[in-house]
Image (cartoon, grey):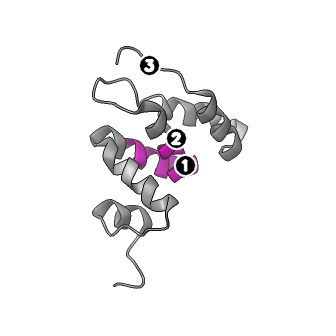
Amino acid sequence: MAGRPPLSHRTEELLKSLVPNAWRHTVRAVLLEYGTDPSHVEVERIRLDILTLSSGEGDKLRRFMDFAKDDYRDVAVMEYENRNGVYSRRKWAVELHGPDPDNP
């Protein structure tokens, strides 16, 4: 994919609903990192997933972006599991959420 696709209207609306105005520029810049490489696929979906999973919070946003750049499928699966109430026991879930208190 050539260039940097802009954020979609849908992504911008979610950004406005989750992130205070003072931080939107910074969060937008991070989201725009995905979609700059030919290996970045499903750009709209993955950007939405990153924003949804992180709620626009800086450290989480960066981690999810790093996951997406490494393998977008990790973020897609995490968002799917999050949306469907499935707790993932994968390494990245423990890293993001801490150990499962029900399964020490």
Q: Secondary structure at mark 2?
A: helix
Q: How many residues crowd around disc 2 within 10 Å: few (fewer than 14), some, or many (20 or more)?
A: many
Q: Secondary structure at mark 1?
A: helix
Q: Secondary structure at mark 3?
A: loop
Residue 54 falls inside the magenta stretch: yes
Marks 2 and 1: in contact by CB < 8 Å? yes
Q: Nearer the viewer, residue 19 or 5?
A: 5
For the N terminus, the quadrant is top left
Tell me the residue that label 2 is attached to. 48
Tell me the residue that label 3 is attached to. 4
For the residue marked with disc 2, what is the amino acid?
Leu
Is 82 situated above or below 11?
below
Tell me the residue that label 1 is attached to. 52
Locate residue 54, reporting x and y percent: 52, 51
How far is mark 3 from mark 1, CA to CA? 21 Å
Is residue 104 rendered to the left or right of residue 84? left
Instruction: Find residue 90 and name its label.
Output: none
Q: Nearer the viewer, residue 64 or 2?
A: 2
Locate residue 32, reporting x and y percent: 48, 28
Task: Write the start and end of the magenta stretch as one range.
Answer: 48-65
- Which residue appears farthest toward the top when viewing the image? 2
How far is mark 1 from mark 2, CA to CA? 6 Å
